[in-house]
Amino acid sequence: MAAPSRETIGEDAAMPNVLVLGAGGRIAQQATRMLADNDADLTLFARDPGRLTDTPASARVVEGDVLDRDRLADAVAGQDIVYANLAGDLDVQAERIVEAMRKQSVQRLIFITSLGIYDEVPGAFGEWNRRQIGGMLPPYRAAADTIEASSLDYTILRPAWLTDTDEVDYELTRKDEPFKGTEVSRKSVAALVADIIASPDLWPRSNLGVNKPGTDGDKPSFL
């Protein structure tokens, strides 16, 4: 499935209030810069704000843990979109996020998980991927299940293995389709997140694999 043209993405629409969870991560920081360039009203939520670099002057920075119910609920209040780019106990974190968004009547969620949570990666690469990260995937699958069972307007993204290549080049697969490719740049994932935030009607209640076209193989090219 080809990525939508950036020319079709409502560039003149007013940008929403956006809460970035896991704002210190490398994808999240790239997305933050893209969103700031489009005048989004940003709240950056991070356990260690010291990891934030090039923080937009207009952004509000909140130190906190997603597992802290009160801290998270306060951060979610007044937001239009929550973008979560987290790691670790993703199953419990997803439960807390859904709970906070329901409490604060916020509907739109963009949530990053991982390729392989549905055993959707075919062939030799799928076998290699299971050997490398299969044991880490159950909480990522549980997080996706929690979000899909909610009434939220979500977009779940399952990126391929990540690179730091300075490019935006990606294609998408749906949940019921075999995953394509082996890798994708962090910048590409950040650009997709920024596009969805700019046009919140893009990919509603969708669960998408994200890869760079033409990267099929037994494993990512950089390994």
Image (tube, rainbow, N blue to C red):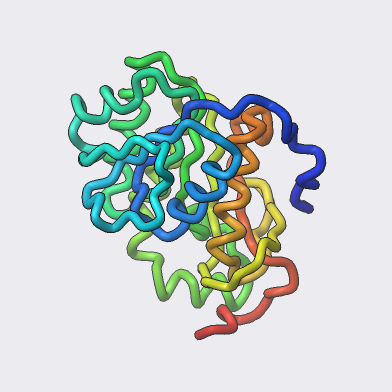
Residue 98 vs 49, above or below: the answer is above
Residue 165 lies left or right of residue 106; in this view the side is right
Front one among 88 and 71: 71
Residue in the picture at 65% in, 67% down = 167
Residue 173 vs 123, above or below: the answer is above
Residue 28 lies left or right of residue 65; in this view the side is right
Q: Position of residue 180 (x, y in %)?
A: 67, 64
Front one among 74 and 140: 74
Q: Position of residue 219 (x, y in %)?
A: 56, 80
Q: Position of residue 104 (x, y in %)?
A: 35, 16
Q: Dividing the picture into quarters, in which one does residue 59 lie? A: top left
Front one among 169 and 15: 15
Q: Position of residue 139 (x, y in %)?
A: 33, 49
Please give the count of numbered marks on the rendered protein: 0
Residue 4 lies left or right of residue 109; in this view the side is right
Residue in the picture at 48% in, 27% down = 17
Residue in the picture at 57% in, 60% down = 187
Residue in the picture at 36% in, 57% down = 53
